[in-house]
Image (cartoon, helix red, strand yellow):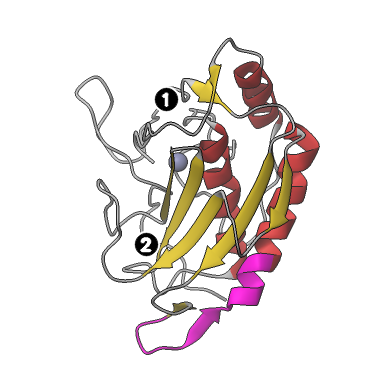
Amino acid sequence: MPALLKNIPYICKYKPRSSRPKREGDCVDDKDFDRKWPAGFQFRWKLEEPQGPMSERDGTLVVSHAEMEQEFEAVFQKWTKVSGYKFRKDEQNPNLKITVLKNQPTVEPFEPSTYAQAYTDGGIGYIEFNNVNRLDYWTKTMVHNVFLHEMGHIFGLGHVCQERAVMYPELRETLLSLELTPWDITHFNTFVASNHKLINGQRKRQLKHW
Ligand SMILES: [Zn+2]
């Protein structure tokens, strides 16, 4: 049984703005990205743990590299059904780079109190897991649920206010693997049906709150 959360943390970076409620737990309804991936896009993913795998402060392994990859595969299956995007592991030429960071996350803003962040830059998607101060919390299930959420950001989805939606900014479920909800599916379909330009290889970092 994992340690339960003392406070419900934000899954990914949440940057309060004056126009938004600032109290933790309040709804945050963030805008979607203004670009989208082409239909049927092939994501080539790679997991890197340059500072070692998910572990607690004493070095105890909590989620292995292989276990993380298994959870990713399960998440990809869920999103494939909804999105039509394709996913395959590619160690040589990835366009979806997933890392576990323990020391200093590479991108600002990023706070120790967040689980992960996602952004796209130059036609590459990045997801960074935070293994800094959440060391008691990581389990396979939580990797699954956070990754399901972060992939939504990679696609271009922002946060929503429905508490049971995967794209809600707080992690409500730590013991069961989440499923995409009707809200998430409608959200995705509305987003891809929009007139947004396609993501290309030009550098345009989209970080937002992620
Ligand atoms: Zn998020």
Task: Determine the CA span between mark 1 and mark 2.
Answer: 24 Å
Q: Is residue 167 visible?
A: no
Which residue is identified by label 1? 29
- Check the image and report above or below for 121 versus 94: above
Which residue is identified by label 2? 6
Some atom of ligand 1 lies within 8 Å of the CB belonging to the residue at label 2: no
Q: Residue at x 31, y 68 (%)?
A: 133
Q: Earlier in the sequence, mark 1 or mark 2?
A: 2
Q: How many marks?
A: 2
* 57 or 136, nearer to the observer: 57
**Secondary element at image label 2:** loop
What residue span does the magenta drawing correspond to?
A: 56-69
Question: Within 10 angstroms of label 1, few (less than 14), some, or many (20 or more) residues?
Answer: some
**Relative to 183, is 40 on the left or the right?**
right
**Secondary element at image label 1:** loop
Work out which residue is located at the far left of the displayed protein and give it.
18
Q: Is residue 64 magenta?
A: yes
Work out which residue is located at the far top of the displayed protein and give it.
195
Q: Residue 113 lies in what quarter of the image? A: bottom left
**Relative to 39, is 63 on the left or the right?**
left
Q: Residue at x 46, y 88 (%)?
A: 60
Residue type, mark 2 in image: Lys
Q: Nearer the viewer, mark 1 or mark 2?
A: 1
Q: Position of residue 108 (x, y in %)?
A: 25, 48
Query: The C terminus lies in which quarter of the figure?
Result: top left
Q: Position of residue 26 (x, y in %)?
A: 35, 33
